[in-house]
Image (cartoon, rainbow, N blue to C red):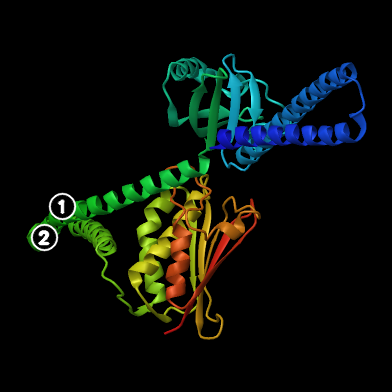
C-alpha cells in the first residue's frame, strides 16, 4: 500500500509539472516567440526539453530523498519508542543501528561497535552457531541468555533474532528479564510453599501416632516404677521424656492448626500467651543461630479480639526476618509496655541485625519486595502481615537504621 501511494504520487506530480511547463511555454510562445524563425524555435524546443528533463529529475530526486527521510524518521521513532533494546548488525557483528533502549542498557559511558562486546565469553561459541542457524532460515524467539553491561556484569535477557537477506544484516531484540525472573522465582517459591503445606499436614499426622504411643508407654512405665527400688532416678528421667513428647505434640498441633485453619476464627486472646507460644516454637532456631532473646511483658493479661493463627503467622514471620538479619548472632527482644496508645496494646519487636537501607525502607510492605536472595524469601511476609494487622483494626510500622538493627512496631485494639 505504501509503495503504491509513493509511485502514484511521484507519477502524478511529475505529469503535473510537465503539463504546467508546457502550458507556460505555450503562453510565452504565443506572446513573445510567434515572430521567431523556425531555426530559433527549434533550439528553443530543445532547450524546453532539457529544462523539463532537469526539472523532472530534480523533482524526482527531491521527492525520493524526502520520502526516504520521512520513512527513516518514522522507523527511528518506532524503534526508539520500543521498550526492548534493538540492535542491527552485519554478519561480522558490526553494529549499524541501536535504539535508545539499547543505548540506555549497554551504553551509559561507552559506545559499543560490535555485538561481541556484550556477549559473555562462555556464550560466544553457542551464539555463533545460532547466528549461522538464523542465517540459514531459522528464527529465534524468546531465547533466554546473558548479556554484558558496561561494568562487565552479566544480566539475564530474552532475545529475538532474525536475518534480513536483502541487507545481509541481523536484527536482534533484547529484553531485560531480571524482574521477570525474580517474579518467576517467587511464584516457584509459593508453589513450593503450597506443596510443603500439604506435605507438612501428612507428616504431622504420621508423627502424631508414634508420639501418642510413646507417651502412653512412658505413662505405663511411671505406673510400674514405684515397685522397683533400684530406679530412684527413673521417674525424673521419665518426666523429662514426657515433657519432650508433649512439646513434640504441641508443635505438631500448631502445624496442623496452621495448614488447616478455618476462616475467621476470632475470639478473645491473651497477647502474652500468643507471644510465648510462638517464642517456644522459635526457641530452637534462636539457640542454633546464637541469638539472645528477651521478652518484657509489663502486663500479662491484656486481651485482643484476634485470629490466633493469623497473628502467630505475623509474629513468626517477623521473628524469622530478624533471624535472617543476624547471621552471626545478636539479640532479639519483644517488649509489650503497660501503657500503649489509648485503647491499644503496643508490641515492639527489635533486633540488632544489619538493618534496612533508607532508600528501600518505604518498600518493605510492597508485595514481592525482598532483599533476600532467590530461594530465601517470597517478599510476601511483611505485605501479608500488614494486611492481617489492618484486618484486626491495628497498624504496623518499621523503624530501621542500616547497620544498627530494626524495630517492628505493632499496635492492636485491646479487647
Which residue is nearer to you in this view: 188 or 302?
188
Q: To which residue does mark 1 refer?
A: 206
Image coords of residue 322 (percent x, y) = 50, 55
Left or right? Give the position of 156 relative to 203: right
Which residue is nearer to you in this view: 239 or 32?
32
Give the residue drawn at x 41%, y 80%.
304
Which residue is nearer to you in this view: 9 or 286?
9
Which residue is nearer to you in this view: 296 or 28?
28
Label 1 crowding class (10 Å Cα cut-off): few <14, some 14-19, many 20+? few
Q: CA distance from mark 2 to mark 1?
A: 17 Å
Image coords of residue 291 (percent x, y) = 48, 52
Name the secondary structure under disc 2.
helix
Left or right? Give the position of 22 relative to 125: right
In the depicted structure, whether residue 201 falls above or below residue 5 = below
Q: To which residue does mark 2 refer?
A: 216
Image coords of residue 162 (percent x, y) = 49, 25
Q: Quadrant of residue 219?
A: bottom left
Amino acid at each position: 500500500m505504501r509503495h503504491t501511494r509513493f509511485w502514484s504520487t511521484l507519477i502524478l506530480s511529475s505529469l503535473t509539472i510537465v503539463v504546467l511547463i508546457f502550458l507556460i511555454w505555450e503562453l510565452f510562445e504565443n506572446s513573445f516567440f510567434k515572430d521567431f524563425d523556425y531555426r530559433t524555435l527549434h533550439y528553443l524546443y530543445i532547450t524546453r526539453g532539457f529544462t523539463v528533463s532537469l526539472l523532472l529529475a530534480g523533482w524526482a530526486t527531491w521527492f525520493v530523498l524526502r520520502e526516504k527521510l520521512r520513512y527513516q524518521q518514522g522507523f527511528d521513532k518506532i524503534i526508539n519508542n520500543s521498550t526492548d533494546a534493538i540492535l542491527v548488525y552485519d554478519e561480522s557483528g558490526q553494529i549499524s543501528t541501536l535504539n535508545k533502549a539499547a543505548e540506555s542498557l549497554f551504553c551509559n559511558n561507552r559506545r559499543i561497535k560490535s555485538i561481541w562486546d556484550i556477549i559473555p565469553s562462555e556464550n560466544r561459541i553457542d551464539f555463533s552457531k545460532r547466528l549461522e542457524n538464523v542465517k540459514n532460515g531459522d528464527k529465534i524467539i524468546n531465547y533466554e541468555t546473558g548479556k554484558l553491561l558496561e561494568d562487565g556484569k552479566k544480566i539475564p535477557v530474552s532475545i529475538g533474532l532474525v536475518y534480513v537477506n536483502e541487507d545481509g544484516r541481523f536484527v536482534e531484540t533484547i529484553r531485560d528479564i531480571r524482574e521477570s525472573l525474580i517474579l518467576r522465582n517467587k511464584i516457584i517459591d509459593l508453589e513450593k510453599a503450597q506443596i510443603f503445606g500439604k506435605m507438612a499436614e501428612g507428616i504431622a499426622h504420621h508423627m502424631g501416632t508414634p508420639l501418642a504411643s510413646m507417651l502412653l508407654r512412658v505413662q505405663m512405665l511411671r505406673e510400674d516404677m514405684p515397685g522397683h527400688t533400684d530406679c530412684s532416678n527413673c521417674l525424673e528421667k521419665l518426666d523429662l521424656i514426657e515433657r519432650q513428647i508433649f512439646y513434640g505434640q504441641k508443635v505438631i498441633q500448631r502445624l496442623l492448626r496452621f495448614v488447616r485453619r478455618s476462616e475467621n476464627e476470632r475470639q478473645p486472646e491473651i497477647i502474652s500467651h500468643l507471644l510465648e507460644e510462638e517464642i517456644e516454637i522459635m526457641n530452637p532456631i534462636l539457640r542454633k543461630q546464637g541469638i539472645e532473646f528477651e521478652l518484657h511483658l509489663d502486663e500479662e493479661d491484656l486481651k485482643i479480639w484476634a485470629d490466633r493463627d493469623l497473628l502467630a503467622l505475623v509474629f513468626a514471620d517477623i521473628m524469622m526476618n530478624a533471624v535472617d538479619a543476624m547471621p552471626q548472632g545478636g539479640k532479639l527482644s519483644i517488649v509489650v509496655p503497660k501503657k500503649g496508645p489509648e485503647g491499644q496494646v503496643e508490641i515492639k519487636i527489635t533486633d540488632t541485625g544489619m538493618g534496612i537501607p533508607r532508600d528501600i525502607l518505604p518498600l518493605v510492605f510492597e508485595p514481592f519486595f525482598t532483599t533476600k536472595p532467590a530461594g530465601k524469601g517470597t517478599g510476601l511476609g511483611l505485605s501479608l502481615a500488614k494486611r492481617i494487622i489492618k484486618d484486626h483494626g491495628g497498624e504496623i510500622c518499621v523503624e530501621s537504621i542500616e547497620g544498627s538493627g530494626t524495630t517492628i512496631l505493632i499496635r492492636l485494639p485491646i479487647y
